Image (cartoon, rainbow, N blue to C red):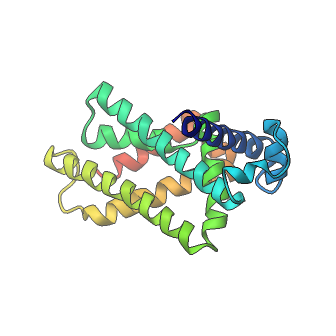
Amino acid sequence: MPRLVDHEARRHEIVLATWRLIAQRGIEATTMRELARELGLANGSVTHYFPDKSAILTAAFAHVFAATNARVAAHRTASGATGLAALRAFLLEAAPIDEERALEARIVIAFLEYAAADPALAGMFRDLMGEWQRAFGEMVAEAQAQGEVRDGLDVQAVSDAILHAVNGMQANGILLPETAREQRMRATVDALVDMLR
């Protein structure tokens, strides 16, 4: 059992090192060799934990997804938020409004570059985004039941639009950093939520 724990701990270290390297040097400079150097490991030793860069990016993306979900769940548990309040909180957790979430957005963008050319990674992305779409749909349905949104909203179309907005906020927050200033991003999220009323 300790060997499994050590293996998982090392995998987690590699994922965090990937985040640091992407933040410092960008995706192209984040190589297996540079990861080994960052971690103080011998060249080639990273492949004991991940076979290639694509696998590392996949793990880093899954970690982003899990981290966002954990923050959303913690907020919802602490606040008891439902409907539009829960949706607003979710969008803020996914938006790149601080250093941690901006780094997460950079990981997402890097992952998408690989996923676009890899059917398995694209499938993983579809599965994870499907989870978010279902969550958005549930929150919009809650808002409908509570009378918070206008009549006649197509929940599926709205959950699709919200997903597009989240992915756009992440990309634009990195490529158009002026849009990711916290006050402006919060105003963007408020505008998205208010459009449903």
Q: Position of residue 71 (x, y in %)?
A: 44, 34
Observer able to see residue 114: yes
Dividing the picture into quadrants, the one containing residue 79 is top left
Of residues 171 and 122, the one nearer the viewer is: 122
Q: Position of residue 6 (x, y in %)?
A: 61, 35
* Residue under the point 81% across and 52% down: 44
Please give left or right for residue 35 compared with residue 121 in the image.
Answer: right
Please give left or right for residue 45 compared with residue 135 in the image.
Answer: right
Would you place residue 14 above or below residue 32 in this image? above
Dividing the picture into quadrants, the one containing residue 137 is bottom left
Would you place residue 123 above or below residue 176 in this image? below
Would you place residue 87 above or below residue 155 in this image? above
Q: Residue furthest top?
A: 78
Please give left or right for residue 142 compared with residue 61 in the image.
Answer: left
Please give left or right for residue 121 compared with residue 145 in the image.
Answer: right
Q: Position of residue 184 (x, y in %)?
A: 56, 39
Of residues 184 and 61, the one nearer the viewer is: 61
Q: Position of residue 169 (x, y in %)?
A: 55, 51
Observer able to see residue 109: no
* Residue under the point 20% across and 47% down: 142
Of residues 180 and 91, the one nearer the viewer is: 91
